[in-house]
Image (cartoon, rainbow, N blue to C red):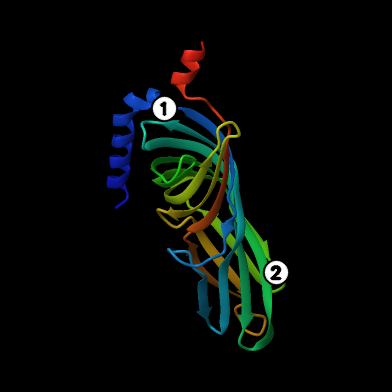
Amino acid sequence: MYLKPLYTLVFVCFAMLARAQMGITTFGVQYKPILPIEGFGVETLKLKTDGYNSTIAPKLGHSFGMVVRHGLNRYFTFEWGINYVRRNYNWRNSNDTIPGTDLSDFGLVSYDLPVQLLLYVRFTDKLYMNVATGFAANFYASSIYTVSSQYAHLSRTRGIIQASYLANLGFELRTTNSGYFYLGTSLNRSMAPITETDLEFERPSKPVKFHRIKTQLIGHYLTLDLRYFFHEAPISKRKKKK
C-alpha cells in the first residue's frame, strides 16, 4: 500500500529537479524529542496470559542529526539528511498471585536517512508554514536483551534495513542574517513491525519453569521538531556579487 505513494513522490521530485537551481541550498541541525503520546498508531502494548500481565509503553526518546534542503521553486523544497534515533520503552510486569510490580526499561537505536518533499505557505515576510511527506530508510544497530528479577525480554530486529513513512507540519521564522528557526511536529510510521519480541516469565511453583510470550513492536512515534538552518544567500544574489 506504500509503494504507489513512494513512486509518486520520487517521480515528482525528479521531475522538478530541473528547476532546483532557481532556489537555494541550506544546511541545518535538528533535535527531535520522541514524545510518549498515544495516537496516530502510537500505543501501549498490553499482554495478559496465564495470570501474568505485561505492558510495553513508549517513553521519552531522542532523535538528532543534520538536514539539507534544496529549493525547487517558490513553493516546494527537497529535503534529506541523517538522524540518530533512540526509541525508549517502559516494560511493566505483574502477577495475579504475587503482589507488586516489576519495572524495567529498554531502548532501540537506529540511524535514519529521511527524504521529504515540503510545501510552503507564506504568512508574513518572515513567517512560513510547511507541510511535508516522505520516507526514511532505517538502519537498526542491534537487538536488545534485558532482564529483571523474574522476567526477561528479547527484541530481535526484523532486518538491518527497514522503511517508514513520514509526515510533518511546522512553522519557520526566516531572518535576514541569522538563519532559519523551525518548530514543528512529525509522525514516523513504520511500514512493518520493527522487532520480534519475546517476553519470558519465571514460574517457580509449576513444573514448567518459564512461560514465554511472543509479540511484535510496531515502532511508530511522534516528535517535537526543533531545527536551525544556517543563513545562505540565494544563488542569484551570490552571482551578482561576483
What amino acid does circle 1 point to?
Answer: Gly
Image mark for residue 34: none
Question: Could you tell me if residue 141 is visible in this image?
Answer: no
Image mark for residue 148: 2
State the CA–CA distance, disc 2 to disc 1. 55 Å
Outermost residue toward the right?
A: 149
Residue sitting at x 29%, y 30%? 15
Q: Residue 208 location in percent, x, y?
A: 60, 78
Question: Could you tell me if residue 238 is visible in this image?
Answer: yes
Residue sitting at x 47%, y 50%? 170
> Label 1: which residue?
23
146 and 123: which is toward the camera: 123
184 and 216: which is toward the camera: 184
Q: Residue 193 location in percent, x, y?
A: 45, 58
Q: Establish if 217 lies above or below 53.
A: above
Question: In the displayed structure, does residue 225 sit left or right of residue 128?
Answer: right
Q: Residue 46 location in percent, x, y?
A: 51, 74
Q: Establish if 112 lies above or below 62.
A: above
